[in-house]
Amino acid sequence: MPSIDARVCPTLAAATPPQLPPLASVAVALRSITECLARELGASQDTAPDWSEFEWRIARAVVAMHGISGLLAAQLRWQGPEGWTEFLHRQHQHIARHQERIQELLARVGEHFRSQELPVQPLKGAALHLAGLYHPGERPMADLDLLTLPRHAERAAEILTTIGLRESHRTFKHRIFEAQESTCPRGFGEHAESNLKVELHERICEALPQRLTDITQRVSGLGPVPGLNPYPSLAALMAHLLLHAAGGMPYRTLRLIQLHDLVLLARRLKAADWQQLLAWQPWWAWPPLALAERYYGVVAPPATMEALQRYCPPILRRACARQLLSDVSLSRLWLEAFPGIEWARTIGEAAAFVARRFVPSAEVRSDRKLALTTDPSLARGDWGGLSQGRRIVRALRARTPRPWPLYNVREAFTEPH
């Protein structure tokens, strides 16, 4: 998701938000339109949906949140109302130009790491582009993900500093480096001049929802070769994509583009690749694959899906069998008391998860403080600055919208037609 420093762009907070329809109507539209567009990517229809002007605006918000404007521009067989096709093609062009900048950055990274005799591994979107799974302009990349060995982390950080990046903050998963001169996002959705960012990983892991699941040893292709190193196998890349998608489901931040990644990569996997994935017994792999099959049809061999389903804990399996993309993605408008509790593997984990919802960890509190200056969805309103207790009270009193979906809806209604 894009970020912005409110101190750099003070006008963002000062701008008057547009008048929106009732939020209950917005929530319903977000769900129905997300499901419709997900089915369109699976099998595009010949005619445009019969949506109102309000729904076409919501569709722009959905497209932006799910990173699918470039794909829709290339694949849709219908035109839609005036302005819709133009919006998609503008986004396609911005994605293509930003991708060129990312590729140039990756080339510079490769050269510098090679000269310093350090290996580095491009991850996720960068690896998919290098493998040729996407044409230019189809898949956005908000940042460049890189994996380095822990013993090389400081030297890797120095290299990134040498090429004009500075460390802005850290999370439990990575260190984030951004261009020295940060600028405001230029308009709604993707933009060619968005800030270049690098996420430097020392490990590949996700919190599901509290327990850390680490697959670094499985997917690391970091060998003795200086410079850019690929994943050791397609199974390793698939495992990483699956874990990353699974990591978004408990927190309702999954994006449709992630399901599309899985589908495209799955078409390249051979029987031996699926067997390698099964040998790791990934308990978290079935939910995202099952969700992808809901919209795209068969993605993995039936025997593979049956085996992955057996590895999935029963409670999680039952919960995910009922879930739609709009339940576990950025399209879910309303806050939940305990989102992702179905991913807890034991009663103790579930209890710890509930406790953390009432008393956030120091890391969560630190992340929230940082978000006040980096997350554009918190630039208006007071949600970002509320204590956990006041958040709970507000959520108990009335349905409370999540800041990020609401921000994108407002931006979609602000954008010129």
Image (cartoon, helix red, strand yellow):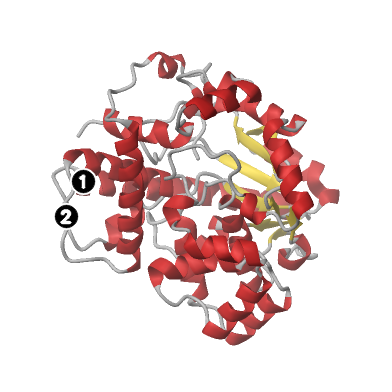
Q: Where is residue 299 in the image (x, y as percent from the top left)?
A: 47, 75
Element at label 1:
helix
Residue 40 placed where, x, y %? 30, 62
User: Which SS class for mark 2?
Assistant: loop
Residue 348: percent from left, percent from top:
79, 50
If you read the primary sequence from the N terminus, does the residue marked by circle 2 or circle 1 appear first?
A: 2
Residue 209 — which label? none
Q: In this view, does 234 lie to the left or right of 268?
A: right
Q: Do the residues labelled 2 and 1 touch (CB within 8 Å)?
A: yes
**Identity of the amino acid at label 1?**
Trp
User: In front: 148, or 13?
Assistant: 13
Q: How far apart are marks 2 and 1 (CA)?
A: 7 Å
- Residue in the picture at 59% in, 61% down: 241
Q: Tell me the quarter of the image containing the C terminus.
A: top left
Q: Mark 1 points at which residue?
A: 84
Q: Which residue is drawn at 20% across and 63% down?
A: 77
Res. 81 visible in picture = yes
What residue lies at 73% left-to-right and 30% top-to-bottom? 359
Amino acid residing under circle 2:
Gln
Residue 211 visible within the image: no
Q: Is residue 193 above or below residue 266?
A: above
Which of the pair 88/182 is nearer the observer?
A: 88
Single out the residue that lies furthest toward the left.
82
Q: Say left or right for 202 vs 126.
A: right
The residue wearing badge 2 is 79
Give the class, few, some or many, for how many residues have Cα within 10 Å of label 1's Cα (few <14, many ≥20).
Answer: some
